[in-house]
Amino acid sequence: MLTQHVPLVNHDATQAERRDSSSDNALLSATLWLMGFEHEFSAPCVVRLSAFIRHHGVAGLLDQARADALGIGYSAPLMLERRAIALRALSLGATLRRLTLALAACGLQPLALKGPALALQAHGQLCARGGVDLDILLGEDQWPEALRVFNEQGYSVAAGQQLPLPKAHHELVLTHAGGLPRVELHRRLLRNQYLLPAEICMTQQVDLQGVSLSTLAPIHALPYLIAHASQHSFRKLVWLLDIHALLQRADLDAEQLAAEIRRTGTRAMLDACLTLLSVLFGTQVAAPLQHARRPCRASRAMVQAALDGLREALTDDQVATRQGIFKRMLIDIAMQDSVLAKWHALKGWLSPTTKDSGWVILPQKLSFLYPIIRLARLVTRQFKK
């Protein structure tokens, strides 16, 4: 997978050559080369390259030897990006450690998702992966006590959020008055209420500076990470690198993982994910996982949308705008593996959110009409774009 060849960089390239090398493909290829993969480095603009790496959250995974080989003009800005993500990772880790201890002192057992726990589990070091928030899963019956603990730690419910959460929402956002990382308190793993029920997931302990964190065991983490990335059109490199890293674990049982992929209904999502991993990183997986894939038109459309999003560093809104809301909805439904799952996905799309409920306020007796309000808002968004 890795190559020791260091391509020569011509710092005297003409202005036209520099403009050409700053294409989206060049930025993606250069970033992958800097992480040790067999791609070319064609000297893109270092300012754009730094911004691209920052968007994709991968500065903590840059190969310093490769960056140093490019000369100070490239290595200095890139190492600044790596330092920034390391500082962010340390802040996230320290905050998660403190919150875990506070919750545990009250008899609560939070499950850490992504973030610092995943950095340790997948990459072996906290500073490999930054982020903007902490994701914590707790049963909804534990929320009253948990919110009391969060409040004592300086956290409060973010503006625009309300309790009880609408059925379509799976997380409550908490912000800190002192500027500490925000927390997303999850009541289920995913937005889709019927995908990946957390109560049947096995956990694994990871050590965070002497504190034992509970997180999803790799067999369960991988379907979750694949489904989460699929919900966001696989548009960030760091999500794919997390999956790639977990798939390389020597203790991963491919047969067991393939069975879990089938059970969780993520076969089409796996197909799109493995295609992207192969194209970007040259990832190879065992036969059981290859057999678990479900190639389909929707997974191919997802791959194309993902590659566009990755190359152009698009946001969720930009991906949705490019696809169109109804095409995105149809792809999401088609990516579900069973008829029942497709039906639940459709219901999920039509489940009213807080904004839908605030768009038109209906009396309690007419609240059953909110799915129609939701559809009307989707149509309105489509025509506005």
Image (cartoon, rainbow, N blue to C red):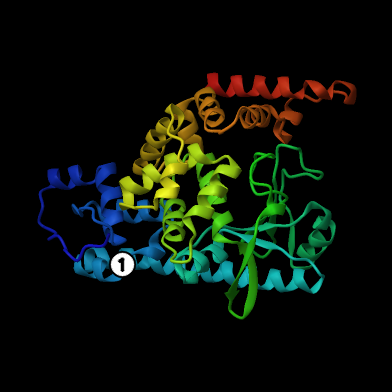
38 is higher (above) or lower (below) than 290 = below
Identified by mark 1, the residue type is Asp
Picture coordinates of residue 96, whole percent (x, y):
64, 68
Q: Quadrant of residue 104?
A: bottom right
Viewer-closest of 344 and 309 = 344
Left or right of residue 10: residue 344: right
Q: Is residue 92 left or right of residue 167?
A: left
- Rendered residue at 50%/45% (across/down): 229
Question: Dot 1 lies on which element?
Answer: loop
Q: Please state if 24 lies on the left or on the right of 297 as rendered.
A: left
Location of residue 196 with respect to 216 vertically, above or below: above
Q: Position of residue 301 (x, y in %)?
A: 41, 30
Q: Quadrant of the N terminus?
A: bottom left
Which residue sits at x=41%, y=34%?
Answer: 305
Residue 216 x/y as whole percent: 61, 60
Front one among 296 and 235? 296
Furthest residue in direction right, as rendered = 365
Q: Residue at x 66, y 21 (%)?
A: 375
Give the percent coordinates (x, y) of residue 39.
23, 53
Local crowd at mark 1 within 10 Å, few (<14), some, or many (≥20)?
Answer: some
Tag count in the figure?
1
Q: Nearer the viewer, residue 100 or 354?
A: 100
Q: Is residue 304 above or below residue 258?
A: above
Q: Residue at label 1?
A: 63
